[in-house]
Amino acid sequence: MKITVLDGKALNPGDLKWDEISREGDFTLFDYTAKDEVIDRIGESEIVITNKTVIDKEVMDACPSIRYICVLATGYNTVDTAYAEKKGILVSNVPSYAKDSVSQYTMALLLELCHHIGHHDREVKKGRWKDTWCFWDYPLLELKGKTMGIIGMGAIGERTAELASAFGMEVICYSRTVKEGWRNVSLPSLFALSDVISLHCPLTQETKGIIRKENIEKMKDGVFIINTGRGGLVVEEDLKEALESGKVGGAAVDVVSTEPIKEDNPLLSAPNCIITPHMAWGSREARERIISITAENIRAYMGGAPINLVK
Amino acid sequence: MAHRIVILDGKETNPGDLLWLPIEKEGELKVFDDLIDDEEKIAERIGESEIVITVDVPITAAVMDRCRNIKYIGAMATGYNHISLAEAERRGIAVTNVPSYSTSSVSQRAIALLMELSDRVGTLSGKVKNGEWTGPFPHWEIPSFTLEGKTLGILGYGKIGRRTGEIALALGMKVIAYSRTRQEGQEEGIEFVSLSSLLSNSDCISLHAPLNEDSFHIIRKETIEMMKDGAYIINTSRGALIDEKDLNEALESRKLGGAALDVLETEPPEKDNPLLSSPYTIVTPHTAWTGKEARRVLIEETGKNIKAWKKGECRNRLV
């Protein structure tokens, strides 16, 4: 059975092994595949594995041998699943692998807002630490006693809530369904009460641009905003304006509206804004888990009882 | 008559974002900003004051001889090795310190340093701002790792070490601790072990021991050799706990994975300190204690110490 990985490097720059998947068939690995190479490279493959490479109607029509598509991620908007269903092609994803990785990263972003370790490290290494026994450009903020507002209490949101509690924070949350064991509040209350707001909801019609001018106005002065969810949750122009006025005290985002980031993205020139290149999901352990779960998906498919199917 | 109070070096504790009120209400207050070590200038600053508050300005026998009015010296810090206790005692001068004010600030910083080693968000943000987020692939050249399941070794189990351990447990880490007074048993999920067991079993070691003869250069060539390959070291305590030359060698040879340091043996550091040019270190300028809340508590406690002394009570008295 022919198995082709279209963009393996997006997941595995070479520090992990593909063995678990490659041993399941006639395996071909590409680091990256440009749009005009996709059809050629899939060729006669029955199983196609993709992380970010788009598999649309055109590709499926041109490659009739495809029976099964594995997405090396949770989000599967890169595959036209409706058309796949019509053609009888099965599609699987990796539904949950990054809970610990993303929640840990969320706290790392929050701690960077509180301590500015990256900034101070760069200043020290430039030779700034020379006249006094200590200096600081931003005061260190203690999390103890501050209120963490979490929007979206799925697995990642709830794990983040647990970690925030461990730092002595009060946690409040807003989710479509009430989350037992936590203090659930309305969205306007969450905006009004939180010292830190962390986004863990999916991107939907309802949540698109949830961080925008009119909602920012409801927030505490100096609030921190963290986004490890999706770039579209934030109206970047509005956030930049609020950072400039000081209404928002700091923002840390791992996702932006267009990735890789555009040169004219307003957040690049906003003050007190930390931007990382969509890394929260990618600890070594999480990436290993993606390969293992995908191998399980393939074995289940071959055994005639496919799992983790999406439509 | 109100006591005359002088704060000799107030700038680091209060750069202007806090009020001196808790100290001010105990007398007539004069505040100086910068650290000095010239005895004549120190004596000039003290003048006729009865109450002297010092963060790091040395109060020696000579200073006490020149300033005969001194009745009370308050260290606005935990450490007091800059005050000559024996000389104070001989002259009947009371001395106090603030033994514990920074537990949550410093433990939070230790974990923040740990997470900068594991997730590198500060480094990555610098790269993005530098225009380096361009290609289709993420920046895997500095791989990140999850803390869950890793072992954190706490070397020195006081209040800060304990609090750091509690947060690490919540992050899903296994936590082991070495304390001079306790080397076996368990306490709320934290296991006590011998020093050699701590060194050889930890993925990351966080230093929380006070500096004394036993702990001086406790991280040196021989102890580093006992550690796991690729282990990480975090120091928010005192620089001299580490032999910096040995540490740098171990980082260069890749025996150790990295080090995140808020303190160095000499501060401010010497220009040629190799740890300042190493790609394997994170160095911050001794700011773990500087949470605004921690500094507020420090000022309040300093005021309470004065108040208690005025009433003839013993509060945080060293002499």
Image (tube, coloured by chain):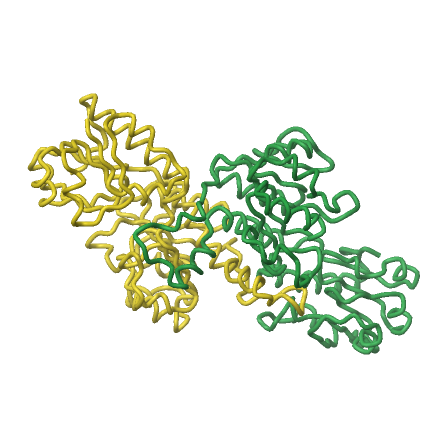
Towards the viewer: A289 or A108: A289
- Answer with left or right where residue B11 lies relative to residue A201: right
Q: Quadrant of residue B61?
A: bottom right
Identify the image quadrant of the C terminus of chain B.
bottom right
Residue A114: image location, x then y, percent: 50, 58
Quadrant in which residue A241 is drawn: bottom left
Q: In the image, A30: left or right of B131?
A: left
Q: Which one is in front, A197 or B238?
A: B238
Look at 85% across and 58% down and name the residue there: B85
> In the picture provided, is A115 more to the left or to the right than A241?
right
Q: Is residue B300 visible?
A: no
Question: x, y percentage for residue A252?
Answer: 40, 58
Measuring from the top left, give residue B305's x and y in whole percent. 74, 61
Question: Where's residue A9, x and y in %?
Answer: 32, 43
* Res. A303 visible in picture: yes
- Of the 4 image quadrants, the one containing the N terminus of chain B is bottom right
Q: How many numbered discs, if any? A: 0
In the picture provided, is B44 more to the left or to the right than A151? Answer: right
Identify the residue shown where x is 40% and y is 64%. Answer: A220
Q: Residue at x 77, y 67 (%)?
A: B57
Q: Which tint is chain B? A: green
Extreme-top residue of the structure: A303
What chain is colored yellow? A
Q: Please tell me whether residue B289 is drawn above or below residue B148 in the rendered image.
A: below
